[in-house]
Image: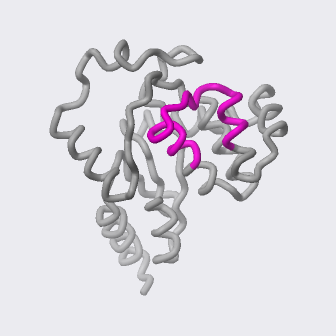
């Protein structure tokens, strides 16, 4: 994952934040054909996404169900608290984009967490109790106020946001500019 590579190469804090591209989706998600019939993305943008994925070693497959990702975002906060956000985020991404799984389903999310060494039952309890709901809502509200409209949304040093699928070169140049502003070597 590009974020992990940045952490290894630079002394900068990089944190993934929640953002729902389609907050109106029902909890179970909707069939892909129904969601994407509006041709929201240009063919050029879709080609760009495929190229960025390929450069990152990701073999994208479009999932049959467009997931409501709210619970996955809450689970990501759980993983952050357990120090396993990178492995969990990678697992969720792979399950959705490579494995065609519905990452809006609590059972799927908890299984992925267990595969990353997290306590799936504790995660289920956190999701059922809404322990991380407010944190996710705050992140999404911030994103709306800031005009964020893409995923992933990556916040650098708690101050700078980069959104959408970007190449590693974009992440790297953004990081270098931040370090220059901070006066770091």
Task: Identify the magenta region.
Answer: 91-112
User: Height in image: 105 above or below 169?
Assistant: above
Q: Residue 182, position in %: x, y?
A: 43, 76
Q: Residue 154, position in %: x, y?
A: 46, 52
Task: Say whether residue 128 is visible.
Answer: yes
Q: Is residue 109 magenta?
A: yes
Decide if residue 178 is on the left or right side of residue 157.
left
Decide if residue 77 is on the left or right side of residue 146.
right
For the stretch drawn in magenta, what is the main secondary structure? Answer: helix
Q: How does the figure colour the protein chain or chains?
A: one colour
Q: Residue 127, position in %: x, y?
A: 74, 31
State the residue in front, 164 or 43.
43
User: Height in image: 163 above or below 174?
Assistant: above
State the residue in front, 24 or 59.
59
Task: Say whether residue 147 is visible.
Answer: no
Q: Name the residue: 48% across, 22% down.
A: 23
User: Height in image: 79 above or below 57?
Assistant: above
Q: Residue 168, position in %: x, y?
A: 34, 63
């Amino acid at each position: 994952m590009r974020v992990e590579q940045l952490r290894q190469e630079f002394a900068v804090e990089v944190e993934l934040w929640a953002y729902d591209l389609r907050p109106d989706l029902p909890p179970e998600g909707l069939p892909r054909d129904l969601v994407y019939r509006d041709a929201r993305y240009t063919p050029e943008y879709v080609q760009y996404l495929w190229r960025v994925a390929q450069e990152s070693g990701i073999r994208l497959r479009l999932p049959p169900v467009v997931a409501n990702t709210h619970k996955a975002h809450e689970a990501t906060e759980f993983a952050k608290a357990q120090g396993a956000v990178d492995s969990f985020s990678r697992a969720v991404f792979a399950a959705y984009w490579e494995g065609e799984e519905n990452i809006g389903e609590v059972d799927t999310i908890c299984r992925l967490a267990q595969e990353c060494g997290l306590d799936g039952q504790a995660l289920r309890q956190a999701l059922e109790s809404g322990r991380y709901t407010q944190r996710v809502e705050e992140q999404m509200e911030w994103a709306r106020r800031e005009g964020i409209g893409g995923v992933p949304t990556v916040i650098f040093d708690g101050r700078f946001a980069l959104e959408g699928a970007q190449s590693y070169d974009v992440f790297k140049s953004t990081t270098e500019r931040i370090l220059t502003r901070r006066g770091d070597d």
